[in-house]
Image (cartoon, rainbow, N blue to C red):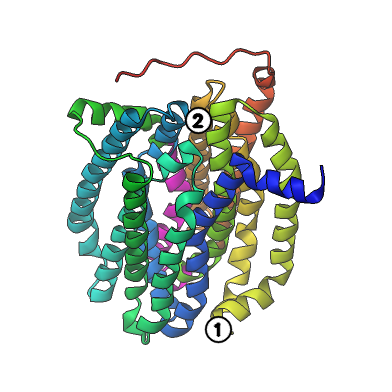
Amino acid sequence: MGVREKLHALRKDPLLVNTAMLYLLSFSNALLTFVTQGYLTRIVGIGRIGILGAARYTTNFFQLFIDFGFILSATAKVSRRREDKAYLSRTLTCVVGAKLLFMLTSSCILLVFILPGVGEDPGAALAYWSYLLYVCMVALLPDFIYRGLERMKEIAVKAVLIKIVATLLVFVAVRQPGDYWLSPLLSALGNAGATAFVYWHLKKRLGIWFCRVSLREIFREMKEGAQFFLSNVAMAVNTNLNGVLLKNLSGALATGLYTQADVVITAARGAMTPIADSLYANTVHTRNFKVIRKTLLTLYPVVLAGCVFVFFAAPWLLTAWLGPEAGPQSVLPLRLLLPVAVFAFPNYLLGYPPLSPIGLTKHANLAVAFGTGVYLVGLLVCWVTVGIRLESLCVLSSLTEFSILAYRVVIVLRNRHLFQPEHPTPALEEEED
């Protein structure tokens, strides 16, 4: 087979195409945030960046609550019954119905318990509401349908173009420090436009739309996503509590510095998660586990090389990105957080993609719970020794990510016989229509 034929075959490979489109759609949010962060830091200052960071970390908990694990549970269901449009329509309706209930609950929690403590700055309250709108628009995107069908190509490019336009408006609208809350609002509007386009495509091109369902069906959907939700809650504690604690115990400056470093780590995660998400849909459908090993051996050296480069080039990169004032201050937090990126890629690939198809989803979830336990114990140790400081929390985040990876590696090695082709597929529970 010649080079041209090989390239043509790659363009037709559903796993490769779906991975690329997931990468484009998922990574775009992190990348666009990365692009605007340097400009915002120069215009609004590191203190207000800390306020935005605290709002984002707080509302990230809401996003995990609203998503409720559906991105994994519903994707698997869609992947197993791709040709049944009536079933897919019911799944879409149940998932969206559940998310709307969670959105209403989240709005009430924000209004009653969180906003009274954000201070007198009206921009801070608007930032919290804008971030909540943002996470709602992200959660309403029915990408689990396209992930399960491995048809992300049909929506990704146009959805990202809509979000790019909204991001460019940040450079137009945010002109003075008091405008800082407009950044999450414009991102929310961009995601709202992308979500509206995807629903149009879902109805007109795929013939999948909302239908009448019972409350019992919606609650059953919640039950199926609950195991993934608990894992996501544990992960949210690991990844977001640092920012909330720093804002309340160390002030806006420390939160701002942590936020800057975490934006880089989030962008790195955003480059990794679409690969794992695509492999998850593929392995559930095909039980082809060799592709996980091949992906790990091919891409992990690139990840490691990138982390080494960022570690040594951090002073120059951060100064060029954030400016001469905030850039040098962010070097140490970023270097301390870099192990998170080192451990994250194998962590993703050795989690749900191999464990769910062989009936060991609970261990993929328990790994995160184990990591949360390590994190909370470490937090207590920091509290009674060095205190809740920026540097100690960055080190603790890296240790937590390593502990999750160690747990998953042990489970994979202990059950490696289940990945053999001759091993039967585990029985799946029958789903009610």
Q: Quadrant of residue 332?
A: bottom right
Is residue 89 placed above or below 81 in the rendered structure?
Answer: below
Residue range in magenta is 231-254
- Upstream in the sequence, badge 2 or badge 1? 1
Q: Say which of 294 and 339 sits in front.
A: 294
- The image position of residue 205, as x and y in percent, is 38, 46
Residue projecting furthest to the bottom: 176
Rendering quarter of residue 404: top right
Where does label 1 land, which residue?
Answer: 325
> Percent from the top left, x then y, of residue 326?
54, 79
Q: Amino acid at mark 1?
A: Glu
Q: Residue at x 73, y 38 (%)?
A: 294
Task: Give the quadrant of the C terminus.
Answer: top left
Cα–Cα span, label 2 and label 1: 42 Å
In this view, the residue in front, 85 or 33, is 85
Is residue 232 covered in magenta? yes
Amino acid type for the residue under numbered disc 2: Leu
Rendered residue at 71%/35% (across/down) = 293
Which structural element holds mark 1? loop
Residue named by callout 2: 366
Residue 352: which quarter of the image?
Answer: top right
Count of numbered labels shown in the rendering:
2
